[in-house]
Image (spheres, grey):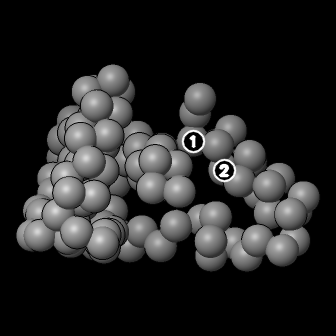
Amino acid sequence: MNCTKQWRRVLKLCMEQPSITRVKIVSMWQETKEGLYKSFNFSDFKEAFAFIGQVAQLAEEVQHHPRWTNEYNKLEIWLSTHEADNEITDKDRELAMQIDEIKT
């Protein structure tokens, strides 16, 4: 599924379910000079590591690998496209949305 189709799906969901705010659906990834960035907090290391494993599996499937750091229950992820001189591309935005689907 391409990024445009996913955004259409998100917008459709926003319109169909007014009780869910867009902030809850559209994640708060930040565009930084290092790439798309998001910080995740978990209840403990075990929960954080399980999420890391799921993201790693997804990254392998789509052959697009994030840069991340993990300290106990905190995970930080940066996404950029190496083939595009580490610029943010639709490939990064699509992976960000897929990562958010894992988290919810």
Three-letter code, disc 1: Cys
Q: Mark 2 falls on what kind of element? A: helix
The foreground one among 11 and 52 is: 52
Does the image show residue 33? no
In which quarter of the view is residue 20 placed? bottom right
- Residue 84 on image: x %, y %: 25, 42
- Residue 63 on image: x %, y %: 27, 27
In which quarter of the view is residue 57 placed? top left
Residue beneath disc 2: 7
How many numbered circles are shown?
Answer: 2
**Which numbered tag is attached to residue 84?**
none
Q: Callout 2: few (<14), some (14-19), or many (20+) C-alpha neighbours within 10 Å?
A: some
Residue at x 64% of width, y 64% of height: 25
Q: Is residue 85 above or below residue 104?
A: above
Residue at x 64% of width, y 43% of height: 6
The foreground one among 81 and 85 is: 81
The quadrant in which the N terminus is found is: top right
- Residue 65 on image: x %, y %: 21, 39
Q: Is residue 82 left or right of residue 58?
A: left
Does the image show residue 48? yes
Q: Is residue 66 left or right of residue 58?
A: left
Q: Is residue 1 left or right of residue 43?
A: right
Q: Mark 1 falls on what kind of element? A: helix
Residue at x 35% of width, y 27% of height: 62
- Residue 46 on image: x %, y %: 20, 57
Three-letter code, disc 2: Trp
Query: What is the CA distance from the residue labelled 1 to the residue labelled 2?
Result: 6 Å
Residue beneath disc 1: 3
Residue at x 30% of width, y 50% of height: 51
- Tags 1 and 2 in contact by the CB under 8 Å rule? yes
Q: Callout 1: few (<14), some (14-19), or many (20+) C-alpha neighbours within 10 Å?
A: some
